[in-house]
Image (spheres, helix red, strand yellow):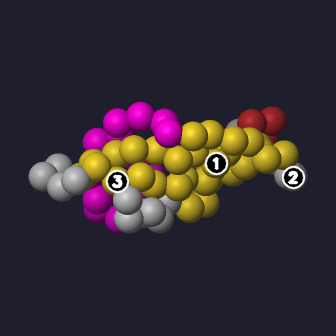
């Protein structure tokens, strides 16, 4: 949430994780569908992808587009 806010300026309030999955690649891709709301707006779902290589101390927010729901 903090990284998304830093990149976009959107101030979202996390609600809950709707769905999650993991994909092993040359690291770990975490796919999270989360529910969040921007202050004064409706709750939306967002599909978030985080790529992680914990053995190298790397973590990157790959995608955080609005699903428009």
Where disc 2 sits, the SS reads: loop
Identity of the residue drawn at 48% across and 36% down: 17
- Residue 47 falls left or right of residue 9: right
Where disc 3 sits, the SS reads: strand
- Residue 56 falls left or right of residue 17: right
Read off the magenta span: 1-18
Q: Earlier in the sequence, mark 2 or mark 1?
A: 2
Residue named by callout 1: 31
Of residues 1 and 53, which is closer to you in this image?
1
The outermost residue toward the front is: 69
State the image coordinates of residue 42 (x, y, percent, origin top left).
22, 53
State the image coordinates of residue 67 (x, y, percent, origin top left).
45, 63
Of residues 52 and 19, which is closer to you in this image?
19
Q: Could you classify mark 3 by the number of other residues whose Cα lies within 10 Å: few (under 14), some (14-19), or many (20 or more)? A: some
Residue named by callout 3: 44
State the image coordinates of residue 65 (x, y, percent, origin top left).
47, 65
Residue 52 visible in the current orientation: no
Circles 3 and 1: CB atoms closer than 8 Å = no
Q: Could you classify mark 2 by the number of other residues whose Cα lies within 10 Å: few (under 14), some (14-19), or many (20 or more)? A: few
């Amino acid at each position: 949430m903090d990284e998304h806010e830093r990149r976009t300026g959107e101030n979202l309030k996390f609600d809950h994780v709707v769905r999650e999955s993991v994909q092993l690649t040359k690291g770990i891709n975490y796919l999270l569908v989360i529910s969040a709301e921007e202050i004064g707006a409706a709750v939306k779902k967002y599909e978030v992808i985080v790529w992680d290589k914990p053995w190298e101390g790397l973590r990157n927010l790959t995608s955080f587009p609005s699903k428009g729901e």
